[in-house]
Amino acid sequence: MILDRSFYNKVSPLKAWWSRRQLKKLQSDKLFKAFKLHKVEWPDRLYYYSPRLKRVPKFVGTKEELSKWKDSKMCETICPTHAIEVTASAIIIDDRGCITCGLCVEFAPAGLLEISTDLTNIRRS
Amino acid sequence: MFNVNEFEKTKSILSHIGPSFYSGSADQHHVELRPKDLLRWIEFAKDDLDYLTLVDIVGVDRQRSGNVYRFELVYHLLNMGNHQRLNLHVKFNEDEIVPSVTSYFCHADWMEREQKEMLNLQFDGVMHSLLLPTSQSNFPLRKGVEISPWPLDPEKKLPLVHKNPNKSEAPYPEESHVWKKFDILSHETSGNFEWLVCFDPVKAVRSEVNIGFHHQGLEKLLENKDWFQVMQLVDKIQIGAAPTYSIAWAKTLEDILSIRLPERAQAIRIVMLELGRVAEHLTVLFEMTHALVLDECKLFLNAREKIYELFEKYCGHRQGMGIARLGGLREDLPHGWIVEYQSIAELLKSNLHMIHKSLIGQKKFREVLSLSPVNAQTVLQWGVSGPSMRASGLNFDLRKSQPFYFYQDIDFDIPIGIHGSSYDRYLVRYEEIHQSLRIITQVLDNLPLGGVVNADFDKNVFNLKDILPQSLPHHWHYSGLEAPNGEAGFFLLSHVNLNPYRIKIKSPSFTLAQALPQFVLGLEQDQLVATLASLGIRRFEMDR
């Protein structure tokens, strides 16, 4: 059950919560019975952290810089929890693993990564 | 203070007795032995050389390095009088039996059981399982073995008392005695361990502690990690005072490689260690007052929140995680942090004084907490360290005895209790908060200028192997520091590459949990929790 972060940003939180609740009702009543899907519970469900509790690295460079970045494997190997993955188009972070140690920021070229409260690049494999 | 002449004296004694191998450096002696000589040496060290404390026992499987003997056990002893440390390296093969030293040190019991389970060693004497289930068949710390998941149907890990409650036998000396079980879900143990207490119907006569519910396999996990990665993962061992363990690990590496720290980094490390100590002490004081249902407990939490705000402004994390780096720190103090600290420190001092006055004035607080005094002999016997030891009147603090960084230039006192009751532990912790604030103020007043990272490590972390010496020292190293609840440190056996061959975390909570039954004798059920809270047992320190 992966929720859409951008959806929450656009709509006001109260409204989002309401529509989310409606959807949940629908799912629990019909979808889950009809297709025999199993619900995904914690810890596989995405959780919206307060910015005070969770910060993750964010890519702040341009796309050219990302494609030129040769030793991006270094970032992945140094990560103590294997939470970061660098692809050709973006960087992906697993929020279950990331402990905000900031090693990837240090091992990347200066100005490419930054620790921030923006959680839009979170994915779970 | 450490004296070189005394060290040389002990060195000459030890090397003339005739062990197969002797070496001495810094403040540590290393002696190699065979299992048959162990008891003779332990007796000699304890009776004649005054090594009264067994700090830890570390076992290692040296299969890969091609030694004659496959296993090695290191008995790390401490002499509190002249601050020297003795390592007895016992080397043996798989089929040999190691004598148990529990007749000399009571608290060696858990340490031996832990090593036995992790490496499948043979000690003489019957030993029940401590951490792993009894049906465990693979031994995690052996080389070439992976940690298996928890078995599906483990045999119930309960002591024999519960399986066969025969009232005429030894555990039930009288008919009136009642055993009560506080399991891991009860609020008394706050989810840390299982606790069986025997009440002579009102007062506690005897108790047993069962640990092993919070497995992480941390020591095995860290063997596959880099030095840098270890520094980040180690933070969470004690979340209340997070900088403690990462700085201890950085200190271990810097001692081995003899890396010089910039003065500013040393000063800021002292500040962070002391802030962590204040936060942890405030947590313990909160737990004590909360257990006694006093209204002051929330005020301690509010005070701790101020410390966490300071951490957050420095590094982004509320508990101050991930600040240490090899050869320095991650970043300098931000602009305006010192002024912020000064305003918070003044607030803290005045507010804590008011809370303290109102607590001491209450008859209930004084009487309940001073019920079960523990004398210095018991504390020494069970290897307890830190404020719990100092409350019984023993004067030993690593900040004074083996001063690291700037601690020898700073003016501060070590508070010491008299009776060793929970009330004394409260007073010691309360006074240590004030002493820590005093230390931080002195350091920040004379903060040295310069960078916070050693110049060699500043930007070229990539080619680290060029900086490090060609052959890393392939021997044991221990370095520790004074954590909030006792002595914390790391045993490290380094290897050719950057992965450690064997790490052992020395944590105060392991020995504190073992000594817990001594602290609660003669207490009623309502008063158990306050005594337990005053020790400061933390779950991830306690379990492996």
Image (cartoon, helix red, strand yellow):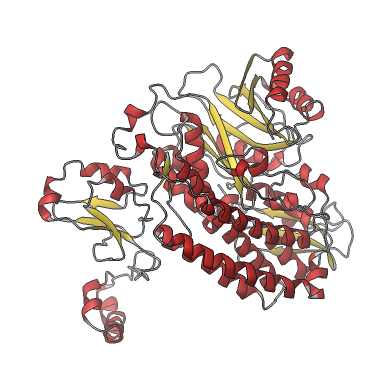
- Residue B450, given in percent of the width and then of the height, sits at 40, 44
- Residue A36, given in percent of the width and then of the height, sits at 28, 72
| Left or right: B296, with A56 as reference point | right
Q: Does A61 sit above or below residue B108?
A: below
**Which residue occupies the foreground of this view, B286 or B92?**
B286
**Which residue occupies the foreground of this view, B110 or A119?**
A119
Q: Does A71 sit above or below residue A97?
A: above
- Residue B9, given in percent of the width and then of the height, sits at 73, 20
**Which residue occupies the foreground of this view, B163 or B492?**
B492
Res. B449 visible in picture? yes
- Residue B276, given in percent of the width and then of the height, sits at 55, 56
In the rendered image, the quadrant that contains the N terminus of chain B is top right
Res. B213 visible in picture? no
Q: Quadrant of residue A59?
A: bottom left
Q: Does B492 sit above or below residue B439?
A: above
Q: Residue at x 34, y 64 (%)?
A: A44
| Left or right: A28, with B444 as reference point | left
Number of callouts in the render?
0
**Which residue occupies the foreground of this view, A90 or B394?**
B394
| Left or right: A114, with B254 as reference point | left
